[in-house]
Image (cartoon, rainbow, N blue to C red):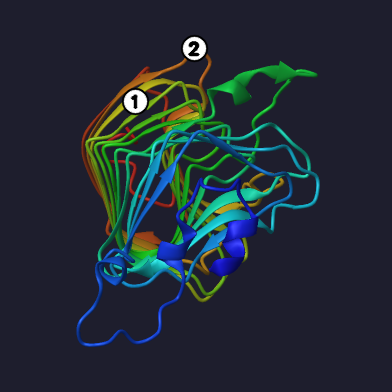
Amino acid sequence: MHALSTLVPLGTLLLALLAPATTPPPRRSRRQRRRRNARSPGPFTVPADTKIDMSGLKAGTTVTVTGTVTWAKGTKYTKSDFLFTLGGSGITFDGTWRDFPRQRPAPKFFKVLTTGKSTIKGITMKNSPIHCFSIGGSDTTFDHVTVDNADGDTLSGGKKLGHNTDAFDVSATGITIQNSNVHNQDDCLAINSGSTIKFLSNNCAGGHGISIGSIDSGKTVDGVTVSGCTISNSENGVRIKTISGATGGSVKNVAYTDITLSNISKYGIVIEQDYLNGGPTGTPTAGIPISGVTLTNVHGTMASGATHSTYILCAACSGFSFSQINITPKNPSCTGVSTSLAGCS
């Protein structure tokens, strides 16, 4: 962690507090006792083509960021890179603001590898280049986080500047995301694998909805709760998607409850087993079965000209239970499940 002192302006991070420590003596000095608390006063600018790596924090470290942190525009990193990495057990990361210029190539921003009841709270992310949070690790709570990519709605050549701006990409166990606000141009939540994942009391706008998937070969999702969320001015509402031709994985035990939709332009509810990045094939495949999906009190409005209020295209779906589905105007299309399912008739 000492190397970080060269990555940001002098005095902006108390990096000595984050340096790996040797085994402390039985009686610690005041300075040693403070090593697990770091403050990063802003505003400051991180130089172009610079990464910050806090993946090796001591257990129990609290990092507090105050003020605006801006990343200077760079050209070196691509979508396989992360500008910021956070890791450790029992970490508390309490921040205020991040700001990024539009740039190509575009790196991902915040890689989270924390474990052991860690907390990330109070951060506002503005204009992440592409994916904002890429979440691994386990047992971490995100609370009162704002992802503000609204500037990405600006059109250039007829297309939005923001692209692939997923807010929370999750491949982890024991993750809770709550009381947060997102405005972006891609998935508000995208669960790629993992278990015991909760998405509670969040607001999503402008993107592709609250998604599980796309699930690829060998990937499993088990135990997802999405509750008390609103989705507005988005392509989709709630979505589950598996990759066409993928095998050896599964999606099971998923519950969407008390979901409010507003001005959804494509699908209010969409569950499809034919997904490809280049566009769905129209023919579902059975290699990633979807089971135990419960939707309760999913309601709201579709935009004028929307495709379907509910769209289900399944080859291997079972144990679906839908109730209190009220999405207007109603225009369902359901294949591979009972047409008596609420929202399908």
What is the secondary structure assignment of the residue under circle 1? strand
Tag 2 or tag 1, which sits nearer the N-term?
Answer: 1
Give the image quarter of residue 260.
top left
Which dot marks residue 324? none
In this rendering, position of residue 342 left or right of residue 69: left
In percent of the image, x 67 and y 57: which residue is there?
81
In percent of the image, x 57 and y 71: which residue is there?
217
In percent of the image, x 69 and y 44: which residue is there?
47
Residue type, label 1: Leu
Q: Residue furthest front?
A: 29
In this rendering, position of residue 317 left or right of residue 266: left
Q: CA distance from mark 1 to mark 2?
A: 14 Å
In this rendering, position of residue 167 left or right of residue 63: right
Image coordinates for residue 198, horizontal then vertical, percent: 27, 53
In this rendering, position of residue 217 left or right of residue 233: right
Towards the viewer: 249 or 309: 249
Image coordinates for residue 14, horizontal then vertical, percent: 45, 55
Circle 2 sits on which residue? Answer: 304
Image coordinates for residue 276, horizontal then vertical, percent: 65, 52
Circle 1 sits on which residue? Answer: 261
What is the secondary structure assignment of the residue under circle 2? loop
Residue type, label 2: Ser
Q: Local crowd at mark 1 within 10 Å, few (<14), some, or many (≥20)?
A: many
In percent of the image, x 42 and y 25: which residue is there?
331
